[in-house]
Image (cartoon, rainbow, N blue to C red):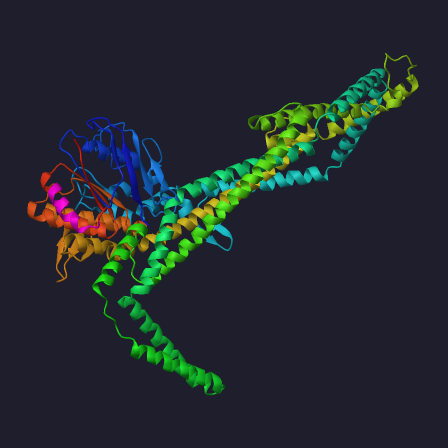
Amino acid sequence: MGINIERISINRGGPLRHDFTLEPARLNLIYGHNETGKTYIVEAMIDFLFRTGKDTPWILKRTKSQEPTVRKWKPVGRIMVSGLEDKTTAFQSGGSKLEDFRDSGCGLPEELSRLMVVRAGDTRLSSTGDGAGDNILRTCLSGKGILDEIENSIKQETVKKAIIENGSIDAKQIGLIEDRLNAGKKVEFLKALQLEVDENASLGAVNSLERAKAGLSMQLKELEDAKRQRAFMLSEELRKLELEIKNLPSEKELIGLGTDITLYRAQLSNLGDIDEELKNSADEEDNYIWVNKAREEYLAHVETPANRSLILKVSLALLLFFILLTAAAGFFSRPLMIAAAVGAVICFIVITGKKPEAVSASVELRRKKLEDEFSRRFQRELTDPATLQVECQKMETRHIHLENLRDSRIELKRDIEAREASILPRFHAIAGEDVTCNNWDSRIESIRRKRKEIQETINSFNVDLSSLNVHEDFYLSDPPSVEWDKRQFLKLNDELKNVSADLEREKHSIETLKTEIYVATENNSRDLRELLTALEDSIETAENTYKDLTARILAENAVFRALHEFRSQENERLDEALGSDEVVSPLRLLTGHYTGLRMDGDGYLNLSTPEGEEFPLAQLSTGAAEQVYIALRTGFAELSMGEPAFLILDDAFQHSDWERRQNLVDRVIGLVNSGWQIFYFTMDDHLQKLFDGSAKELDPGRYRSVSLN
């Protein structure tokens, strides 16, 4: 299904005196004289659906070279569009535009708004050349704009001209090539420095001495009696907190309760979904009852030529099959040969005996009514009993599904009530009061938060107590009164002085090495561990830079070569696109005279006739050229998107003479029949009458005419 506008809502504003709402048909005529809001609606649709401003066809401000093409309205409303996503998409002023969906797989062309909108009677695709323009054609049909954008992103000529052979890059040493060479040299230098660090034994001695110093300092600190008193206080606080957390619900209980609440709400949501689906399925049930009755009547009284033709085709196929089977079975199975021969005889009898039966007028009338009703209900034609049978089977599956939904609803409601009856008393036990459904989560979160706070405090206290490294037998509740072990203290203090002196000597011996690391990494820290980490980080960064530069050079060089090859085939693709059925068919449909397109060496379009004559597009009359421009718009759009879409035509035929107008209107009817959705805006009474007259050829409901007051 193509991209279609499902609903238009525009609030009154400017010359539009009333809100404008439209649920479009396939062909939509919006008629209004000056100052009735016709132009306001057109420009509101452009503002909602397409990008405006610089580098677009819809210029808001006057420039040195271009007049504004739309005014600075600030319309309010929205347009609902189908065919872009699984659901309809809303477009409004300041929101997403159709161009934003170019990468979503919808096949939207680059010159989207230029193709799908004719503004103020200007049907041309371009203001240059013959009204189509070589640049526009190449952009629409060969992706020139994308190719230019990709090539412009490759800035350096040295990368484009680089020769890649046997894993090496041969190019002039400037720009990215020079950056890559310098990055490689930096990697080599940093790795050599890292190797020197690894081979320096002094680093291991420093690490060992630092650990010894830290151990001695800890032992000295443990001698301080203040630590023992601190340990006692922490242990007392821990006992109180552990008793408090014990009286709270466990995390397991909270998780279980939370799970039940999640299931309860999911069941409520499922119940709402079932109710909504059952509510929306009333029409389907009515169609189900009708299609079952219609099937019985149709199969009982109606046999169409298509039925008989199908039976004959099947019988002929079976006859041929049984004849071949009879011949083949004669070699290995006599019973199978006899069975196949009997089947062939039966098929022959069916073929020779099937005679068309006269269909009475009443049966024919009833068949017509059934087919019309089927078309009204299901928006497609009833051509044979198989179509009705298929629809019946589809609706039977849906009917069974709805019956199952009703049964599921009863059981689901019972489960919801049971689960609620389970949750409420548990909350009462936890909170000491009834807790409403809206407060369940907050109450659980409050309990969990309190548990977490207490547990974090316990963990923190445990960490502090553990770091003190004091056994509980040595806790002191009062200030210490024991004798100080001075000999042990002096011994540990002497050892600490000796270790510190050795550490200073080792550190002095590696200062030169630290300075080299500092210069290489530009890290101003004097801590050895931080410098070593910085060196590893610098090596990793340099290696990544080298890899990134190499990958970028290789990628840009490969892309440039691919673009060069792609551009060499551009004219062939352009000729192929101009000769495609998507472009030629609307040209033939709209002009009734021209049957082909070709671009000459100067980038201008020539049109050909069945007689082989060619006419330059630039030399056609205004009215004839309008037909070609509209055909090119629809053809280019359908070629890009793979199917028809919609067109907004603002007085597109205002320059055509009265004799040609009827033909143009008829061609628009042809576009509608080909799948296009058309919005035609006009202030011309004559065109309004022509559309009203020609639209009678369309099926009911496919034409809508709106007059603005």
59 vs 541, nearest the viewer: 59
Would you say residue 697 sits in the magenta stretch? yes
675 vs 276, nearest the viewer: 276
Residues drawn in magenta: 688-699
- Whether residue 507 is situated above or below residue 387 in the rendered picture: above
273 vs 694, nearest the viewer: 273
Residue at screen point 35% across, 33% down = 95
Residue at screen point 14% across, 59% down = 609
Would you say residue 303 sits in the magenta stretch? no
Where's residue 33, x and y in %? 13, 33
Q: Is residue 603 in sight in this rendering?
A: no
Where's residue 627, x and y in %? 15, 49
- Whether residue 86 is situated above or below residue 165 in the rendered picture: above
How many numbered marks are there? 0
Where's residue 197, x and y in %? 69, 37
133 vs 544, nearest the viewer: 133
Q: Main secondary structure of the magenta part?
A: helix
* Relative to 399, 313 lies left or right: left
* Relative to 182, 158 lies left or right: left
**Snapshot quadrant of residue 686:** top left
Residue at screen point 19% across, 53% down = 587
